[in-house]
Structure formats: structure tokens, C-alpha cells
Image (cartoon, rainbow, N blue to C red):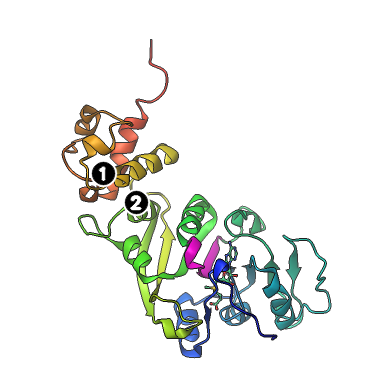
Amino acid sequence: MNEHHPRKRFGQNFLHDPGVIQRILDTISAQPDQHVVEIGPGQGALTTGLSSAVGRLDAIEIDRDLIGPLAKRFGIDSTFDLDAPEGATFTSAGEHPCLRIHNVDALTFDLCSLRSAPAAPRLRVVGNLPYNISTPLLFRFLEQADCIEDLHLMLQKEVVDRIVAPPGTKVYGRLSVMVQSYCSAERLLTVSAGAFRPPPKVNSAIVRLRPYRPLPYPIADPAWHAQVVAAAFGQRRKTLRNSLSSLMTADQIAAVDIDPGTRAERLSVADFAKLANASAACIGPEIP
Ligand code: SAM
């Protein structure tokens, strides 16, 4: 493979430690009857092991300069067209007949469109994510949770800490509530910076998310719930009475047995669902 200069703007820190790569693959444990989507294959550190294990692998890579080397590595060099438009898909043959590489942006790409039929297996999403866009990517995955079986994501360790944090802790916040409302979240491995080239300035960790079906605390209006959670943590040092004043009254908060004088970090995921559901019902035209 030609020397590729890692691009900061695409969050490129490539895994190069074979022991760490194998541990990650073992943790994911992809099987032949499964459909995996890899976000950001980069130079193929995880792609090689995944493509030989699964029934279908779709790899989503934004960096056009990585597509050529990836295509070559997976036996698509004879059909790879350098003049292909951005957003093109390249289908592998030979040793890796079940691999497709998509030169697209994971932030806007519709993952669910990759499923061949509504009854087809749900997608297993895997990625050593670009850290600069990991939060918007997570929110994008939550929107598409219906077609996702599970996610194994490498993230900055501090982001994993926030995702799995319980209420009442310093790092419990918007990300914790949003992810835990829709998925079970489990921290798996911690990976040190030396496993990557170039090494990032922070340590990393892998989190496993499994979308709940059904949700343990059903949410009537997801957009409204997201707005309530964002407002509550937007001013996390303020009491709910103040931080939510533009969205609901103190009486509405008290009506669901939540103290308007408490702070967002004290509320559980169930409390947020209850609060959003009760106040959502009061939106819209008044009943004459
Ligand atoms: N999976 C490889 C590895 O573990 O060595 C690369 C991981 S690197 C941290 C992140 C990868 O995501 C890079 O290949 C980068 O080009 C790609 N990427 C960054 N932003 C992206 C986006 N919006 N959509 C798809 N891929 C993206």
C-alpha cells in the first residue's frame, strides 16, 4: 500500500497493533450469517478480519484517497474506476466476495438502506470512529436504531465514560441519557494510544450498545424528549425549574413527582422519559 499521510480532519488514527486488532475482532465475534457495517475502514485494520468472518460487509469510508488502496487490498483493483463519482460503491470479488466499499459520509448515509429486505438480519455496526465527529455519529446511529442489532464502537475513553455513567455522577449528562434511553451500554476494552498510528493524545475504549426492543421507558415524542434532555443539561448547574422554564412550568415538573428544585444530573433515564411524555401531551392547540 502506498504511504498515506493520516488526515487530522478525518480523525485518522490507524490501528496497527495486531494483538489489539485481534482482541477487538474476538470481542465483536462476527459470524457468517451476519451483516456487518464498518464505519471508517481506513487502511483495513479491522476490515480484513471482518470480511473473512461475515456473510456481508459494507464499509463506509469518506476519504477518497483511501478507497483505491482498500479496493486493491480486497481484490477490486481490476474494476476500480478512479473517475467514479463520489458516493460510488465498489463490490469486491475473489477472496472477499461479500464486501462492498462505499465512498460516502457516514453522517448522512442511510445505513438502513443496506439491508436487503425488512426481514433480513439487522445490521451489526462496527467502527474505530473519527473522534472529532463521534457524538454526531452516535446520534445518527440512535436515529437508525430500528435496523441495528448492536454497535461496537471505539471512542475516546472519556466519551465512553459519559455514555455509561449512572445518574448523580460528574460525567452523567445529555449523552448518557440519550444513549441509555435507547440502548444498553457496556464498556468493553480500554486501548492505549500506542496501538494507533499516529497515537492520539487520549486513551480509547470500546463500548457495546444494543438497541432496546421495546424501549424499557417508552418515549412518546423522541424529538421533544431530546429537546427536554438538551435543555436540562444545557445549564446543568441550574435547577430544573430554571433550566426547563422555556419548555414547561414547575407545576408540570412536580405533577410527575419530580422536584423542580433538583438538577438534571439527579434524574434517571426513566425520569426523563416520564417528564418528556407528560409535558409532550400538553403541547399543541388547546382543547376547546
Ligand atoms: N478503522 C481504521 C483503523 O482502525 O485503523 C481507521 C480508523 S480512523 C480512527 C477513522 C476512519 O474513519 C478513517 O479512515 C477516516 O477517513 C474515516 N472517516 C472520517 N470521517 C468519516 C465520515 N464522516 N464518514 C465515513 N468515514 C469517515
Give percent across and percent down for residue 173: 30, 53
Closest to the observer, 150 or 88: 88
Which residue is denoted by mark 2 in the rendering? 174
Q: Quarter of the image holding residue 93?
A: bottom right
Closest to the observer, 282 or 156: 156
Which residue is denoted by mark 1 in the rendering? 271
Q: Image point 55% across, 60% down: which residue?
A: 122
Q: Quarter of the image holding residue 163?
A: bottom left
Q: Is residue 239 above or below residue 104?
A: above
**Type of amino acid under label 2:** Arg
Q: Secondary structure at mark 1?
A: helix
The quarter of the rendering in which ligand 1 is drawn is: bottom right
Q: Image point 27% across, 60% down: which residue?
A: 171
Q: Is residue 267 left or right of residue 155?
A: left
The local crowd at label 2, few if under 14, some if 14 to 19, many if 20 or more residues have their Cα within 10 Å, is: many
Q: Secondary structure at mark 2?
A: helix
**Type of amino acid under label 1:** Asp
Measured in 3D between alpha carbons, the distance from the residue under mark 1 to the one under mark 2, in whole angstroms, is 13 Å
Write down the region rendered in magenta: 122-133
Give percent across and percent down for residue 178: 38, 51
Give percent across and percent down for residue 100: 70, 69
Closest to the observer, 160 or 188: 160
Q: Is residue 39 above or below residue 277?
A: below
